[in-house]
Image (tube, rainbow, N blue to C red):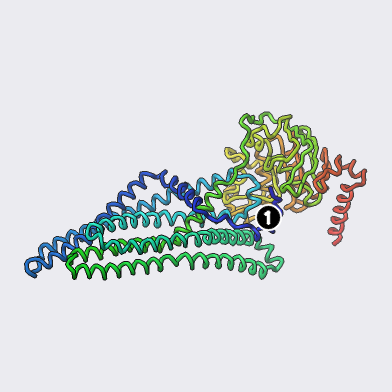
């Protein structure tokens, strides 16, 4: 596991995805086929339509050859009746082929949407099951890039390239068989040219496929950077860092552009090369076919049909070569999707895990050791006891391990050594869902979603009534503000509540916490985003909320935790002091030093 705080600095040095080997490609294709096979009815019907449509089109050269033969019958006189009958049948076949191709294309679009819809659901469900460490290692923009860009790339390949390959395969095989039937000797021309195309394309795939993987990686890095910078645009402007941010984006954009160019330049090479080889084939067919006609070894209608079939034979090969770049891009995108799906989920509960019921709130840490990274231990040997209904305050400088304790309490991470119990139950023998429901949590980083104020408060209790929501809002001292809004509790909050102040956002999350009935409470700098007056207003509400609850409070303002039953003072991952406010102040140690420094700071601000 890694320290989340170090992730951003290492993002630029993040290693590329492993190059796709041939066995990886086969595995990707098998997994894509599993998605396609789930829609087997649509798939089979589409393939049948492709087969019929292309078989109808394959009759065209044969009928045209018969029409040419009819022109030369009856001592040079044109048999218009036969010519028009063949042409009429030819038109009917081509119209039927076009109609079936259209229906099949519509069905493939529908099939591809079903496939990518399921793929998106699988990816999103996977994201919901991943541990917190995954999100500490990956940028949000990179994850979104997988859900949007990579899956859309797969969708385009399924809806267009897949059916193109199927149709081309039918045409190639059918044309080859018809050419064998007309003149087997003339088919020998393709014995030389087709292997050249196949060998060249295979060699190019080994070169180009890793470039498309790199392209997807660079795009994900750029999206991650954009998401991060857009989220912090106010800070960027406040510090006049627009120029540096633009330079950073230019670097990411340039890297993505270069990756796109390299993949694109080499990706389109097979198309023109294969086209040249196929034109060479057609030239040789024309030359040798003409010689056979002049020598009497081939009739004019046979030569005409053979030339047309040779064009039908080489045309799909050109088409496959031209979509070669799209196929490589789709394989690289599918690889990123499947690598995300293969991420190790949160460690499952033990088979005999029990639900935590009738929670009293007796919490113990017994010689707990933990580090996000094996080389950097955050908590060295933490031991503490929180009796039921007690208020435990956790203080210390940044990086001391305060939030890490919360992560371990909620089992967002598991301790490397030592034990944690709730009501004498080992938390690793409990079901995570029941453990997390036992806590109500208010974090420093507020999270609100696009929806009404009522929905945001009721998020902790989906079946809450309006009366319960209003009562929670009153307790959090936010009801008055809400009622002054034009739509009151039906007011729509924009994404993450950007249309209200930070303090109001924090109060809404506090109201959400008050609505949830749990016997343990976690407050992680919960009042850090409100002003002093507002903070005082919610202190009484907090006291009411914490009644009969085991409460863990991470506090920056030490004046807010003076009444705590136990204050843990962390420094460099160790508990250096513990006791009540009075006892710690009497000791005159690190806590007393921090408290006095804050008191001096507050006096300085007031004088200023």
Evaluate whether residue 99 shows in this view: no
> In the rendered view, would you say 470 is above or below 494?
above
Residue placed under numbered mark 1 in the picture: 7
Nearer-the-camera pick, 60 or 182: 182
> Which is nearer the eye, 57 or 525?
57
Residue 171 lies in quadrant: bottom left
What residue sits 39% from the left and 65% below the top? 274
**Where is residue 186 drawn, in percent x and y?**
26, 63
How packed mark 1 is, by other alpha carbons closer than 10 Å (few <14, some 14-19, many 20 or more), is some
Left or right of residue 321, residue 346 in this image:
right
Left or right: 390, with 207 as reference point: right
- Secondary structure beneath disc 1? helix
Q: Position of residue 607 (x, y in %)?
A: 86, 60
Q: How many discs mark residues in the rendered view? A: 1
Left or right of residue 68: residue 408: right
Say whether residue 542 is visible: yes
The structure residue drawn at horizontal position 73% and vertical position 33%, both measured from the top left corner, is 421
Q: Residue at x 19, y 68 (%)?
A: 293
Of residue 93 and residue 124, the one placed in the foreground of this image is 93
Q: Quadrant of the C terminus?
A: bottom right
x then y, percent, for residue 576: 86, 44
Residue 410 % position (x, y): 69, 40
Outermost residue, left direction? 75
């Amino acid at each position: 596991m890694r320290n989340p705080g170090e992730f951003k600095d290492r993002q630029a040095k993040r290693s590329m995805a492993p190059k796709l080997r041939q066995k990886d490609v086969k595995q990707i294709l098998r997994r894509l086929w599993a998605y396609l096979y789930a829609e087997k009815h649509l798939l089979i019907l589409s393939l049948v339509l492709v087969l019929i449509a292309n078989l109808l089109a394959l009759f065209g050269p044969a009928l045209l050859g018969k029409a040419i033969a009819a022109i030369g019958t009856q001592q040079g006189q044109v048999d218009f009746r036969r010519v028009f009958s063949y042409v009429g049948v030819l038109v009917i076949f081509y119209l039927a082929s076009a109609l079936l191709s259209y229906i099949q294309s519509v069905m493939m679009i529908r099939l591809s949407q079903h496939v990518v819809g399921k793929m998106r659901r699988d990816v999103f469900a996977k994201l919901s099951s991943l541990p917190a460490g995954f999100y500490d290692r990956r940028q949000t923009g990179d994850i979104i890039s997988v859900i949007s860009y990579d899956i859309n790339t797969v969708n385009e390949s399924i809806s267009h390239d897949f059916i193109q390959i199927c149709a081309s395969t039918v045409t190639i095989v059918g044309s080859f068989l018809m050419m064998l039937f007309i003149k087997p000797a003339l088919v020998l021309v393709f014995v030389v040219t087709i292997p050249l195309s196949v060998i060249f394309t295979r060699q190019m795939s080994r070169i180009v496929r890793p470039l498309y993987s790199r392209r997807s990686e660079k795009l994900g890095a750029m999206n991650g950077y954009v998401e991060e910078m857009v989220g912090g645009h106010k800070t960027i402007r406040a510090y006049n860092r627009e120029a540096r941010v633009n330079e950073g984006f230019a670097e990411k954009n340039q890297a993505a552009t270069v990756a796109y160019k390299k993949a694109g330049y080499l990706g389109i090479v097979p198309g023109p090369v294969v086209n040249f080889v196929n034109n060479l084939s057609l030239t040789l067919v024309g030359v040798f076919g003409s010689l056979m006609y002049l020598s009497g070894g081939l009739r004019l209608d046979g030569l005409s049909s053979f030339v047309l079939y040779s064009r039908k034979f080489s045309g799909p090969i050109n088409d496959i070569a031209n979509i070669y770049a799209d196929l490589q891009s789709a394989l690289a995108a599918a690889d990123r999707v499947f690598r995300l799906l293969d991420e190790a989920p949160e460690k499952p509960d033990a088979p005999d895990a029990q639900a935590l019921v009738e929670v009293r709130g007796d919490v113990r840490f017994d010689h707990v050791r933990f580090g996000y990274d094996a080389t950097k231990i955050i908590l060295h040997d933490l031991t503490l006891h929180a009796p039921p209904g007690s208020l435990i305050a956790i203080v210390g400088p940044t990086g001391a391990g305060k939030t890490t304790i919360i992560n371990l309490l909620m089992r967002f991470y598991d301790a490397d050594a030592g034990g944690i119990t709730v009501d004498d139950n080992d938390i690793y023998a409990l079901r995570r869902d029941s453990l997390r429901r036992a806590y109500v949590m208010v974090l420093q980083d507020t999270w609100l979603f696009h929806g009404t104020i009522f929905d945001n408060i009721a998020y902790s209790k989906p079946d809450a009534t309006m009366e319960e929501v209003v009562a929670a809002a009153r307790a959090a001292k936010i009801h008055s503000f809400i009622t002054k809004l034009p739509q009151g509790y039906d007011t729509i909050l924009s994404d993450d509540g950007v249309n209200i102040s930070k303090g109001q956002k924090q109060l809404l999350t506090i109201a959400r916490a008050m609505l949830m009935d749990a016997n343990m409470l976690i407050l992680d700098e919960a009042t850090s985003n409100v002003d002093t007056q507002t903070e005082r207003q919610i202190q009484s509400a907090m006291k009411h909320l914490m009644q009969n609850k085991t409460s863990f409070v991470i506090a920056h303002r030490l004046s807010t935790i003076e009444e705590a039953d136990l204050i843990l003072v962390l420094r460099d991952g160790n508990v250096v002091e513990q006791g009540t406010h009075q006892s710690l102040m009497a000791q005159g140690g690190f806590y007393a030093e921090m408290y006095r420094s804050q008191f001096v700071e507050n006096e300085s601000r007031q004088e200023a």
